[in-house]
Amino acid sequence: MTVYTNAYVFLNDRFVFGGFSVEDGLFSDIFPGKTASEGVDLGGAYVIPGLVDIHTHGNSGADFSDGDPAGLEKMARYLAGNGVTSFAPTSLTLPFAPLKTAFRNAKTLSENRPADCARVMGVNMEGPFFSEKKKGAQNPEFLRSPDLDFFNALYEESGGLLRIVDIAPELPGAMDFIREASRRCVVSVAHTDADYDTARRAFDAGARHMTHLFNAMPGLHHRAPGPVAAGSEREDVFAELICDGMHVHPAMLRLAFRLFPGRICMISDSLRCCGMPDGIYTMDGDGREIYVKGRLATLTDGTIAGSASNLYDCLLTAVKSGIPKEKAILSATRNPARELGALDRIGEIAPGKYADFVVCSEDLSRRAVFLGGIRRD
């Protein structure tokens, strides 16, 4: 057992001075308001849970949808080194065969994780059940109507790791799909041109999640409130938010946290260009190009194509944009862990959960990352 002491530890929804212990890779005890005479002295540092990214396509030149086991492992290693200790690799709009391979790879890595890699705690199936009008950077060639057999087959290939499936609820057969798929995983409203009433019907049918809020969906309007308003009204609907400083204006970040109090899941939506220098990269297997300059990644026509930022950088950007530190941390840890159905294992510093944590400064600048109680860097 290892005791860590003299730190401000993020417990529930606030920082508490004290310490904690780790045994066999799990948090074993918490000591709020106390310091220990022996153990690892953290010197007044701040400690937060390891971050959880439920929407990330790639980094370090690799993409989940490539179907390359070594590439997925490379992604997981980069994430762990940057304070993201659990994740749900996220697929692109592609045919069944490459998705099958990618989902199998996720299952394999989740069962045989190298100690220096982030944990695969789910798979996010982004596409192909999307609106042509709101496809964003998704490949229109592979869009299709909701198909329960397609979904169920991939669910089985993932070994039940498929935890989030995205859908545009205005598509033919969408409501029946939502009712059935929501029995197996979280259904998310995404890449949609749905109006307010259609979105409400989707939530009534069982959808309870929204993919990258504001992006690839109608905006808020006082006479046409759209899906954002429909989701805000439902206390059981959580919303993803890309906080890279490019996808959503800071004022809208602050508004989102008010519209969905306690229900924001911060995401990166990162692509293979994340962690890489400026340049030209491929979007997916068909060779479509991504142009990266600074933190902005676009297709050739200027369409924003995911992000070039990791989730820890998004956390820092959100705080700099005026999101209270405690709310930002919850949106990058506990909330996404809940959406993956994994809050019993990750997302909080609490006895019995994986000892995945980040030691940082008061401004959340990262100092060290621990996975299962073992220092990663």
Image: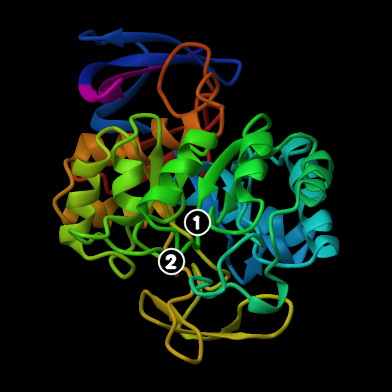
Please give the name of the residue rendered at 28% of the width and 66% of the height, measured from the top-left corner.
245
Residue furthest bottom in the image: 300
Instruction: Examine the rendered structure and indicate whether residue 254 appears above or below residue 362.
Output: below
Q: Which region of the structure is painted magenta?
A: 2-15
Please give the name of the residue rendered at 55% of the width and 22% of the height, measured from the top-left corner.
345
- Visible residue check, residue 52: no
Left or right: where 159 falls relative to 182: right
Q: Position of residue 50 (x, y in %)?
A: 44, 36
Rendered image quadrant of residue 293: bottom left
Is 286 one of the magenta-colored residues? no
Q: What amino acid does circle 2 point to? A: Ala
Q: Position of residue 149 (x, y in %)?
A: 82, 47
Report the front residue among 65 and 129: 129
Report the front residue among 277 and 212: 212
Secondary structure at badge 1 equals: loop
Secondary structure at badge 2 equals: loop
- Visible residue check, residue 332: yes
**Residue carrying label 2:** 216
